[in-house]
Image: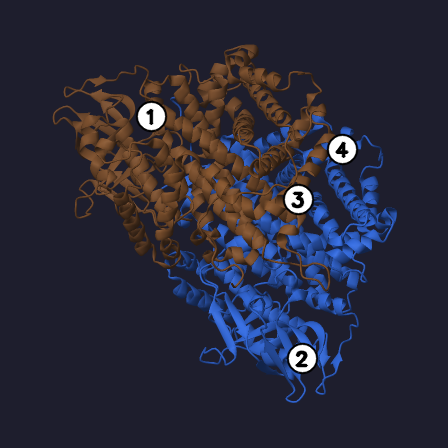
Chain colours: A brown, B blue
Amino acid sequence: MADYTQPVVDVPALTALLDGTYAEVRSLTRKRLVEYAQVLDDAREMSREDYRERVLQVVKELAATGQTGMGFPVEHGGGGDIGASVAAFETMGFGDLSVLVKVGVQFGLFGGAILQLGTKKHHDAYLAPLVRADLLGCFAMTETGHGSNVQALGTVARYDLETHEFVITTPDESSRKDYIGNAARHAQAAVVFAQLEVGGASQGVHAFVVPIRDDKSRVLPGVRIEDDGRKIGLNGVDNGRIWFDEVRVPRDNLLNRYADVTETGVYQSPIDNADRRFFTMLGTLVQGRVCVGGAAINASKVALSIAVRYALERRQFGNPGGPEELLLDYGLHQRRLFLPLARTYALHFAQEVLAGQLHAVFSATEEVDERTRRALESRAAGTKALGTWHASETIQECREACGGAGYLSANRFDALRADTDVFTTFEGDNHILLQLVAKGLLTDYSSSFGELDQLGMVRFVAGLAVETVIERTAVHKLLERIKDVLPGGDDDWDQEAGLLDPAYQLAMLRWREEHMLSGVARRLKRGIDAGMDPAEVFSRCQDHVIGAARAHVERLVLEAFVDRTTAMPEGGNRTALSLLCDLFALSTIEADRGWFMEHGRLSSARAKAISREVDQLCRRVRPIARELVDGFGVPAQMQATEMLGS
Amino acid sequence: MADYTQPVVDVPALTALLDGTYAEVRSLTRKRLVEYAQVLDDAREMSREDYRERVLQVVKELAATGQTGMGFPVEHGGGGDIGASVAAFETMGFGDLSVLVKVGVQFGLFGGAILQLGTKKHHDAYLAPLVRADLLGCFAMTETGHGSNVQALGTVARYDLETHEFVITTPDESSRKDYIGNAARHAQAAVVFAQLEVGGASQGVHAFVVPIRDDKSRVLPGVRIEDDGRKIGLNGVDNGRIWFDEVRVPRDNLLNRYADVTETGVYQSPIDNADRRFFTMLGTLVQGRVCVGGAAINASKVALSIAVRYALERRQFGNPGGPEELLLDYGLHQRRLFLPLARTYALHFAQEVLAGQLHAVFSATEEVDERTRRALESRAAGTKALGTWHASETIQECREACGGAGYLSANRFDALRADTDVFTTFEGDNHILLQLVAKGLLTDYSSSFGELDQLGMVRFVAGLAVETVIERTAVHKLLERIKDVLPGGDDDWDQEAGLLDPAYQLAMLRWREEHMLSGVARRLKRGIDAGMDPAEVFSRCQDHVIGAARAHVERLVLEAFVDRTTAMPEGGNRTALSLLCDLFALSTIEADRGWFMEHGRLSSARAKAISREVDQLCRRVRPIARELVDGFGVPAQMQATEMLGS
């Protein structure tokens, strides 16, 4: 149990702890952000056209410093360190997010697709110029009518046996490429995802390098591009739509790491199963999700830093005669800011674990087994979903907590909120991502089922006895772990353990996850057994499926926070983080106390005790709130400028 | 209990029902919005300067048609109908919201202050030109350091006995006027709220007409104005800061309906108590809150109309081979859209009751008693808070439910979201407004305590026995009403009544309100009795205070919905609205089921049954979803333009 004498926080040590392994990269990135702080003002004051050019200029200059190429192989001008590239990207979440997303499009999506889906010939041809940002590209996957369900894309790439070319065509309006970053103005090439047709047979979705502009930025024949126009945010990024009318590219332009077409039109792949091939290809692109989640969590830090500082200066109401009270001395204001503060710390550490796993898998010198890859993808999906929703909610709450001052663009919430908003839907819609997480859990990332969509999952689960599902899945191990932490293991543990005992908190979240997952399995099975259509069964359980996934991810987040805190040396910083960890755990249970009570895992008396404890923890955070946001190390230039007329 | 054969909805009749008494005004306003639909595009594509001028032009043209002056007396060029003016304003919530807010500033705030706080000499001098929008004005109340606590404003108006003038001064930076709409460019005059000083004595906050620009738009000597710059939204409105350096205005410029200063420097008022005088002045400005809440509810209708239509066209995933499933056939998507849909209907009817009460009070030919006025203010505060939060949440959910398409500004969510965002904090911060509601309930709008701030409320409540609080307050009547609807009245009513019985639903919300209010009273009293500082007592109970107020307002909203639905003739529309009413009631209970279970008012089995019923109700809404949003009558030109490439 945590020691609750009021801690003294060592801010530089806290920043060093948060910055972790890549402290140097993060520190360097902060310096770059400060050098380019002007772009935050430009974003507000420039026309959309000028701002786009400005962002391009910044991206090119950053590329020249090596800031954006850390993840590429050294032999192609990169830094050869995936973990460093993630850390650099995350830290850029403090700054202008159009710059961040333009970097993500160019180096993460376009560059990442060529690196991961291409082979040596592609690497040799494209990587060095794209790392230098001499070759600008875009990632043309999403279509107006096809987003989350990439397997249903409409764009066609037909192999022409006579000319040894692929012919790329947009068959209908719903298959135009849409929302494609870098497409409206700057990209010279696109990685286009299209249905490969060879000899009249469809081979599913594959990726092709397709030139779309010449070196004078003129759109090439057969290609039509339209600007997506103004967006809620990220207006420094030129999103657009692309149509292809029989555009021909050489056979070599198929990114052929996982499948190829011979000159004579024979389709070949080392992966026999088409679904598995598809998901293997997609799986290599996981880094994008990891990066978006990390940047979102950092954007939350900016918002909290501003709102807490404001609440420590602004006074309102109070005892007649005396000075008014500081906003941060109001109980509700503490709840509004400290719950997201605690959750931000929790997500930070969960993200750290995830980024470490990503680095390990993608830097491994030996083949990584498929189950480990699927588990990484699942964790990336879940952390991205929770991290980006958290950013939206936290930034909004912070904006409101700053009242009218929060509404002024100069005070940063405008860009933070508008730019991060699409994070919840791009790089995978959050709900779809959580369905992916649930699918992984229910099938235990089983390779033979990992490829199935949600209806496949329904049929799979329905085909087993419920006990088998539970035994086969991750849920089983979870129950074991509950017994580990609370060896008594009887039904009264939740009534007896101390609220501030991490073992209690973890057991609660594990129990919820297990119960929700096995409940989902039962409901899916019952629906199918009753003869219902799988789509209907899924539709009715969807809320439950997503709830189970969310419960799983929250459990992982708490584990990461507890692990990190308990590994710290004794002292003020450990005490402070333990306090936040308790606040995160108990406010998470409190938020779902209805569910815990419904399922007999929380008495009403204890539920009320948890709410009181949350209030109490907020009061303990109050004296160190400033230090806890200062610890994030958000550069002053990235924060608000016009808060109190000072 | 409702009849649940699947209803056939008569859309025109539904629109007529929603439009209510002022159907003609609403219809005319829709036509005007369509005439000016171009301004929605201008908002996206024009520079801030041009857009501001464009909005001014629209406001002036609307003023010329009589659209914006319906609430002013006929003899000053107005329409003499307050209800009509509210209906017109609410309906403008479908269109460009900078136009709406510029209208609100000019006619509601500036014009409203002169009408309500001024006397004949002011009406004769200012009303006709301001109704024509020849005289443009602003409402200079908020200061950088003083927003919600208007009594603590820093600006000073000193009476100069020698010249018979008031001298207006900004004493420090935190007292500069800030976020003032119309100030940065267009206002020629300001209604300035300042601390009146007469003969060295402070008389509290009063309002003064202060010219700030000459007829060539040059800022007058002694006045300094700064632009607030870009904001999250509403960039067609020119918000700014104002400093006054010994600016002199004639004695006649005091808006003297409630207090005056004689030429010889004697302060006079028909209201002896300074607090009561202040709150009486503020109370006359209640119409602004009513209007903002109504416009916010209508903005939600726009968002829902777009998102439901999109979900009825866009397909995603589904059985292999067949067409993909419509988004709206997914259970989660139904929950995401239909819960806010039901709540929008509920708030619509609650707003209708409120607007009717406003009209009655402000059109009354006889003196309205103070308690009725306070109750109106409380209801306006609560409806504004719930309506504007609802708008923010609903628009955001709809944006996310439309994925990438929702992120494009052409599809309306950008402006809807950004423009309505400040609604939760302007015209009274929502949390402060709910505190006002709670104060009214705890003191039963007692005139002798209505003026107290939150700490006064703490002391007042603490001074009574808890039983007395309960007896004295509105809570008491509430308990009586629970017994009325469920005469059995024993503790098992919640386990026995049908979930779809409105009497059950109302009893649940009434019981929650009563329990929370008496709980707050007990906690406030206990804190003071224990010798705690009132500020600390309040801080600790603040969450509870606001929760009680919210429970109160939700109860009023449900009552309004039930009353309206049960008064309808039998038929498809009544069945459809009953269905939405059930969905609103049960989803409201579901959302707070943790609380109900904690307090022994809901068993876990019944809580689960409510969740199942909510799912079931969503499935019943599904076939009539299109009709239910079409019933809102949002003009097609106000909806999305680039959703599916069509």
Question: What amino acid does circle 4 point to?
Answer: Arg
B626 or B107, which lies in front? B107
Which element is circle 4 on?
A: loop
Q: How many residues crowd around disc 4 within 10 Å: few (fewer than 14), some, or many (20 or more)?
A: many
Residue matched to label 3 = A619
Cα distance in 3D space between marks 1 and 3: 44 Å
Residue matched to label 1 = A363
Q: Are marks 1 and 3 in contact (CB under 8 Å)?
A: no
Residue matched to label 4 = B601
Looking at the rendering, which quadrant does residue B310 occupy? top left
* Above or below, comparing residue B34 to residue A493 in the picture: below
Looking at the image, can residue B623 be seen?
no
Question: What amino acid does circle 2 point to?
Answer: Lys
Cα distance in 3D space between marks 3 and 2: 53 Å
Circle on res. B120: 2
The chain identifier of the residue carrying mark 3 reads: A
Which element is circle 2 on?
A: helix
